[in-house]
């Protein structure tokens, strides 16, 4: 089969359900973020680049001059990028445990986050071991994370002074960065101001102790766009880079095709449990996509029923989303037939539906929609 407007066959796309990833849109979003923030970007590619495909998204992003580094959540994610040939600096944004994971991070040339005095000791031990083995890897760079209000990972200030002093006194260790994570940059000015004040104090007092940071960073997408004082030396975009922030280009589209069409009378139950009954004589299209692909089952119930775009028209889902299939009421769309494209995320004619619309119906956030797309859904890349 071929995609609309494309030439050439698509290998192994025998089930007509796929996600399109627009790498050109990704790069344009990153350039726009850099133009606003006026500092380099650490592009966050954790969770398989939020469902977009980490290696391909990383390669595309690194073509943008402003992208200075990548961010992942674990050694495993960083190792996968290294094994895919990515050579750019990679910061592990999560805490490392146990000690062996620090050694693995060093092996793959990843920059670990230190979030406690114990974490500082781990990297110090690793550096001590390398002094007698492979001094070429020294000094080991790390970033110290300050907890200013997120409450997950990080040392609180002023307790962090002891960690800074310990790292500065460590031969073979370079304290390259200091950072924090904004919890409510999009919805609470007072909370964000308190976080930024604590972080500014940590920067100021760390530098008074002798720290000379290459990177001081606090801003996620919301911080970078709404809080100029949060930008420091680097910003860490995710949401906006993937076009999940209003005004930025959506990068991912989720599409399938009609595989069966039937006419049913009024009052016909559809799907598991007969939770839905047609209120009129209806034409129902079956789509080969279900909750095993990442389409939340809740989107087929009650007021949370989602729509799919078929032939440029909005069609409500009908019946419970099952593991592998969903149904849509296409009664109001003339001529729908097997093979027609059905768009869950993206554009069809003049109609468009974003991941945010599905998230709102499901009572969640856009991140959960796109990261929930499983490996059963092929990612197809275009420029």
Image (cartoon, grey):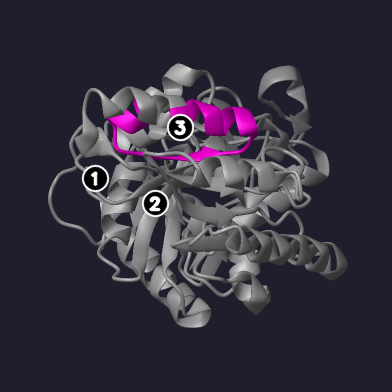
Quickly name the residue at label 3. Answer: 288
Left or right of 104? Residue 211 is: right
Q: Residue at x 53, y 58 (%)?
A: 211
Q: Of residues 326 and 38, which is closer to you in this image?
A: 38
Q: Earlier in the sequence, mark 1 or mark 2?
A: 2
Q: Earlier in the sequence, mark 3 or mark 1?
A: 1
Q: Residue at x 77, y 41 (%)?
A: 151
Q: Is residue 214 above or below residue 126?
A: below
Q: Whole-percent x and y of residue 371? A: 53, 40
Left or right of 241? Residue 298 is: right
Q: Earlier in the sequence, mark 3 or mark 2?
A: 2
C-beta proximity under 8 Å, tags 1 and 2: yes
- Residue 64 painted magenta: no
- Residue 108 painted magenta: yes
Q: Is residue 271 above or below residue 373?
A: above
Quickly name the residue at label 2. Answer: 70
Q: Which residues are magenta?
A: 104-124
Left or right of 341? Residue 13 is: left
Q: Of residues 117 and 58, which is closer to you in this image?
A: 117
Q: Residues within 10 Å of mark 3 (few under 14, many from 20)?
A: some
- Numbered mark located on residue 256 in the image: none
Q: Residues within 10 Å of mark 2 (few under 14, many from 20)?
A: many
Q: In the rendered view of the protein, which quadrant contains the N terminus?
A: top left
Q: Secondary structure at mark 2?
A: strand
Residue farthest to the right, as pictured: 190
User: From mark 3 to mark 1, how far is it between C-alphas?
Assistant: 35 Å
- Numbered mark located on residue 86 in the image: 1
Q: Quarter-wise, where is residue 321 in the image?
A: top right
Q: Secondary structure at mark 3?
A: loop
């Amino acid at each position: 089969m071929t995609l609309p407007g494309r030439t050439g066959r698509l290998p192994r796309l025998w089930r007509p359900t796929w996600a399109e990833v627009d790498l050109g849109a990704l790069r344009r979003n990153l350039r726009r973020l850099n133009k606003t923030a006026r500092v380099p970007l650490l592009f966050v590619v954790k969770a398989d680049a939020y469902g977009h495909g980490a290696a391909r998204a990383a390669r595309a992003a690194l073509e943008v001059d402003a992208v200075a580094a990548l961010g992942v959540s674990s050694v495993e994610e960083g190792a996968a990028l290294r094994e895919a040939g990515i050579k750019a600096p990679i910061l592990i944004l999560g805490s490392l445990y146990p000690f062996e994971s620090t050694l693995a991070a060093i092996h793959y040339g990843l920059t670990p986050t230190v979030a406690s005095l114990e974490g500082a000791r781990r990297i110090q031990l690793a550096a001590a071991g390398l002094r007698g083995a492979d001094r070429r890897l020294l000094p080991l760079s790390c970033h110290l994370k300050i907890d200013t209000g997120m409450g997950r990972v990080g040392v609180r200030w002023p307790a962090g002074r002891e960690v800074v002093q310990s790292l500065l006194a460590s031969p073979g260790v370079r304290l390259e960065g200091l950072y924090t994570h904004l919890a409510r940059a999009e919805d609470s000015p007072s909370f964000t101001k308190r976080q930024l004040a604590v972080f500014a104090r940590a920067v100021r007092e760390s530098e008074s102790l002798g720290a000379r940071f290459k990177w001081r960073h606090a801003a996620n997408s919301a911080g970078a766009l709404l809080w100029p004082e949060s930008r420091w030396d680097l910003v860490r975009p995710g949401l906006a880079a993937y076009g999940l922030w209003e005004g930025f280009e959506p990068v991912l589209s989720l599409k399938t095709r009609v595989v069966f069409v039937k006419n049913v009378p009024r009052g016909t139950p559809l799907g598991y449990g007969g939770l839905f009954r047609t209120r009129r004589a209806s034409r129902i299209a079956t789509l080969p996509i279900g909750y095993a692909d990442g389409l939340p089952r809740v989107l087929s119930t009650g007021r949370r029923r989602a729509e799919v775009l078929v032939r440029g028209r909005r069609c409500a889902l009908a019946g419970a989303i099952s593991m592998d299939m969903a149904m849509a009421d296409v009664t109001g769309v003339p001529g729908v037939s097997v093979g027609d494209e059905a768009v869950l995320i993206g554009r069809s004619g003049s109609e468009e539906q974003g991941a945010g619309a599905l998230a709102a119906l499901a009572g969640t956030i856009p991140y959960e929609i796109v990261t929930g797309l499983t490996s059963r859904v092929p990612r197809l890349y275009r420029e």
